[in-house]
């Protein structure tokens, strides 16, 4: 995958790997933390926690509905709980259990969905979480986090466990371009990070698309267009102040996400813009379709999730 290389971004750990390391660190400090997984710990990276703390790790098998039942029961009994599986298995398979077992009683269970987006490649559409943000943000009381790279995922994991309430954290399979340097990650739930200033347009992105947005902004800069870039790592609660400021100060907004446009970042940002300061907008994301099996880079190119697609979206909205 070449996203970010043209602007010198190095590739670091996959966000799922950074999560796994952060989870061990948290487990060392918090003896009340238990982890529940649906037999994919080698993929979600919770197996690292299981090897370190075998008495606090539970594999319930390929049964996500039961996974959530166990997680909510442990939480109700006073444990700090992390439940993990693939994003699509977790949110699509066990949605009713999450709704009634976690969201409704407002239990502070933390959920981690790995293998999100289409960049997982050969695993195919049955494994690709592309509806998960929409489903998670629809749940009352839930916080939804989509970090951009390894360092920000580690920071997001720490923030998630410091938050008193249910949280969904989205991670990916592929190695991620390093937007942030290790140890230098400002991460506050509900507050976007401005990575580049600009007066002509704002690109608001999350996850892997943050690196793509930075690369697109560099190309646009060479064409005389100064683009502000916001890393909107928290989709809910979204940073309304940053969005309104972007609308007022730059006059147009493009969103970019590795998710369906319906119910994702595009929808969340559009709702704020429509209410607080309407401006012209354009959107980069999956357009009402499932992807297919293939190499991650090829899929991102085919479905329009590359820096060049963001550049084109910016040029369209400025015509």
Image: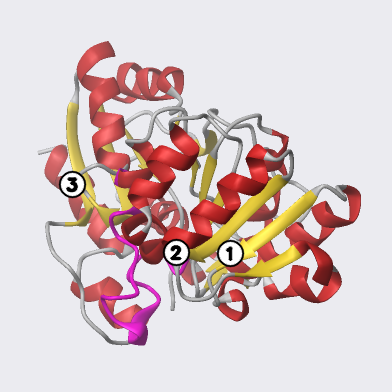
Q: Which residue is mark 3?
A: 315
Side (left or right) of 150 relative to 34:
left
Other residues around mark 3 within 10 Å, as few (<14) / some (14–19) / many (≥20): some
Residue drawn at x 21%, y 65% as measured from the top left: 304
Residue 177, percent across and down? 55, 66
The picture quadrant where one finds residue 23 is: bottom right
* Quarter that holds the C terminus: top left
Distance Cα–Cα, label 1 vs label 2: 22 Å
User: Disc 1 vs disc 2: Cβ atoms closer than 8 Å?
Assistant: no
Label 1: which secondary element? helix
The picture quadrant where one finds residue 249 is: top left
Residue 45, percent across and down? 64, 72
Distance Cα–Cα, label 2 vs label 3: 43 Å
* Quarter that holds the N terminus: bottom left
**Magenta-highlighted residues:** 114-134
Distance Cα–Cα, label 1 vs label 3: 31 Å
Image: 20 above or below 146: below
Considering only order in the chain, which callout, 3 or 1, is on the residue closer to the N terminus? 1
Q: Which residue is mark 2?
A: 64
Q: Is residue 124 magenta?
A: yes
Label 2: which secondary element? helix
Residue drawn at x 52%, y 29% as measured from the top left: 106
Residue 15 - label: 1
- Dominant secondary structure of the magenta stretch? loop
Q: Is residue 277 magenta?
A: no
Residue drawn at x 34%, y 87% as measured from the top left: 122
Image: 170 above or below 123: above
Residue 267, percent across and down? 24, 36
Please state which of the two labelled residues, at mark 1 or mark 3, is closer to the viewer. 1
Please state which of the two labelled residues, at mark 1 or mark 2, is closer to the viewer. 2
The picture quadrant where one finds residue 41 is: bottom right
Side (left or right) of 79 relative to 149:
right
């Amino acid at each position: 995958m070449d996203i970010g290389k043209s602007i010198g971004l190095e590739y670091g750990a996959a966000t799922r790997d950074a999560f796994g390391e952060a989870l061990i660190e948290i487990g060392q400090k918090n003896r009340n933390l238990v982890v529940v997984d649906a037999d994919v710990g080698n993929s979600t990276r919770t197996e690292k926690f299981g090897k370190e703390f075998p008495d606090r790790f539970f594999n319930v098998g390929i049964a996500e509905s039961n996974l959530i039942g166990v997680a909510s029961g442990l939480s109700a009994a006073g444990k700090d709980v992390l439940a993990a599986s693939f994003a699509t298995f977790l949110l699509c398979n066990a949605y009713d259990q999450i709704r009634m077992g976690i969201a409704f009683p407002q239990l502070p269970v933390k959920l981690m969905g790995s293998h999100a987006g289409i960049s997982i490649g050969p695993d195919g559409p049955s494994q690709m979480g592309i509806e998960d943000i929409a489903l998670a943000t629809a749940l009352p009381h839930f916080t939804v986090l989509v970090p951009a790279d390894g360092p920000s995922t580690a920071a997001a994991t720490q923030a998630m466990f410091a938050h008193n309430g249910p949280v969904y954290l989205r991670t990916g399979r592929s190695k991620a371009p390093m937007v942030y340097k290790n140890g230098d990650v400002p991460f506050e739930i509900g507050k976007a990070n401005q990575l580049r200033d600009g007066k002509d347009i704002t690109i608001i992105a999350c996850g892997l698309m943050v690196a793509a947005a930075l690369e697109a902004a560099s190309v646009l800069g060479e064409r005389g267009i100064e683009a502000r870039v916001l890393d909107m790592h928290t989709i809910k609660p979204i940073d309304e102040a940053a969005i309104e400021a972007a609308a007022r100060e730059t006059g147009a907004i493009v969103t970019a996400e590795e998710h369906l446009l319906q119910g994702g970042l595009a929808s969340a940002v559009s709702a704020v813009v429509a209410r607080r300061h309407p401006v012209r907008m354009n959107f980069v994301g999956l357009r009402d379709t499932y992807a297919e099996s293939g190499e991650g880079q090829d899929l991102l190119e085919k479905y329009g999730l590359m820096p060049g697609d963001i550049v084109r979206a910016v040029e369209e909205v400025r015509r």
